[in-house]
Amino acid sequence: MAMGTRRKRRRQESLWVPVAELPSTAAHPFYQRLNQILDEADFDVFVETTCQRFYAPAMGRPSLAPGIYFRLMLVGYFEGLDSERGMAWRAADSLAIRRFLRVGLDEAVADHSTISRTRRLIDVETHRAVFTWIQQRLVERKLLTAGPLGIDGTTLEANAALRSIVRRDTGDTYQEFLTKLAQASGIETPTREDLAKIDKKRPKKGSNDDWTHPDDPDASITKMKDGRTHLAHKAEHAVDLKCGAIVAVALHRADAGDTQTIGGTLVAARTQLAATVGCQADATLEVVTDKGYHSNDVLTDLAAHHVRSYLSEPDRGRRAWIGKAAAQAAVYANRRRIHGARGQRLRRLRGERLERTFAHCYETGGLRRTHLRGHGNILKRLLAHAGGFNLGLLMRTILGVGTPRGLQGRLAALCAASTACLMACWGRLAARDIVSDPIEAISTRHDDLSWPNWWCPEMDTSTTGC
């Protein structure tokens, strides 16, 4: 066989190429099955009907179909893409994703600017309606119920630099503000060392009451999980602890405490449960959180709104309850519940299934750092990621895996298990000096290789295995 060279393969591309001659490949089994689920429930009909008011009847340039747009958002979650540029590039590069999007090989994939424009065109409530539609598929499979809810939050790094913040009152940048302080202290031409000394001695220099970002006013100065200080947002999840599905997603300012945000997230969770499982507004819910949410006001409000709380209690020592009878009753009732067998079991589930949603949506999902600005735009991406996570749970009940990469890992694990089994068989044969080569163990027939004698020498007639 002669070796081909790259020079010989150079040729002039034809001006016209028949569609039948374009290269094709088998669809990815994960995306193919996901498309079947979406088609069986008329996903495209639903989103086109819901988004019809955002599109003109017939004018302007060709638009991005709602079904393709929301599928691109799902690709962003399943492929761990943090930006719309990455979605556009991945869709143009992958034949399997093209087939998932229903984009032909002779068609151009939507540019990142078209995806961004479509996102800005479709409002948050429509994204929330699609998220609710995905939850209804879980209800049909009897996965999502009005079970105990776990609530927790995490920080997302904002698409804004801390060095670009300005004063709320004067609009001065941080450098200009330090320069004015130095001049007021008697230094006419301060150096960088002078400004650093003045900044080091100044207390509360990163207060959100005094500083904001001109391009992203929703971002807040906060300390991240790794100890660094950044402009960030706070995402909060309400998760069904029975199946691990995300019930509600809320976005808050990063400087808002847990005790201030739990009310809004709980209201969003009640709204979603009413739309999916028919949960009544006055139905009793169970809520499990960590100790950051524990306070007298929170426990009193939860008890007043028919919520059984399982809030981990921090060690505050001996407390005085004079004039706080309602708070005392709520705190003691919560303490009694968390120390019971059910409370301990629910807290273990919170640590397992609630934290898993953050890992999938923001770590492997690629959204730990946002590329969008404004809570409205970011919340659209969060709802799409949460919907993708819930679809992953549905796919796990069907295929056994919840992501395309998980399916690849399953195949690799199957090959590794087969290889390990083969090597174990060869090891037992080699130990009995029957064969010295694993290929020989397969291709050569030996009289004493009948089951179970060759596998368990000590067993001659038993057929129960070893």
Image (tube, rainbow, N blue to C red):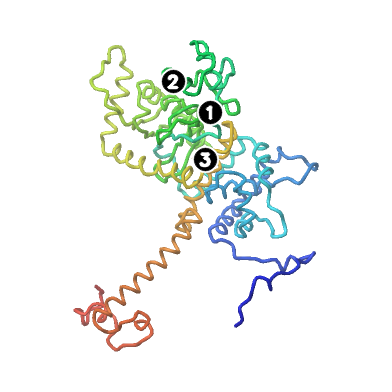
Residue at 59 percent across and 51 percent down: it is 41
* Dot 2 alpha-carbon crowd within 10 angstroms: few under 14, some 14 to 19, many 20 or more: few
- State yes or no: discs 1 and 2 in contact (Cβ < 8 Å): no
Q: Secondary structure at mark 3?
A: helix
Q: Horizontal and vertical percent for residue 31? A: 56, 57
* Dot 3 alpha-carbon crowd within 10 angstroms: few under 14, some 14 to 19, many 20 or more: many
Residue 275 lies left or right of residue 68; in this view the side is left
Near-viewer residue (250 or 194): 194
**Circle 2 is placed at which residue position?**
197
- In the rendered image, the quadrant that contains the N terminus is bottom right
Residue 111 lies left or right of residue 178; in this view the side is right
Q: Secondary structure at mark 1?
A: helix
Q: Secondary structure at mark 2?
A: helix
What mark, if any, has residue 163 been given in the picture? 1
Q: Horizontal and vertical percent for residue 298? A: 39, 24
- Image quadrant where residue 463 sits: bottom left
**Circle 3 is placed at which residue position?**
276
Mark nearer the N terminus (3 vs 2): 2
Mark nearer the N terminus (3 vs 1): 1
- The amino acid sitting under disc 1 is Arg
State how far apart marks 3 and 2 are (Cα).
Answer: 58 Å
- In the rendered image, the quadrant that contains the C terminus is bottom left
Q: Is residue 238 above or below residue 210?
A: below
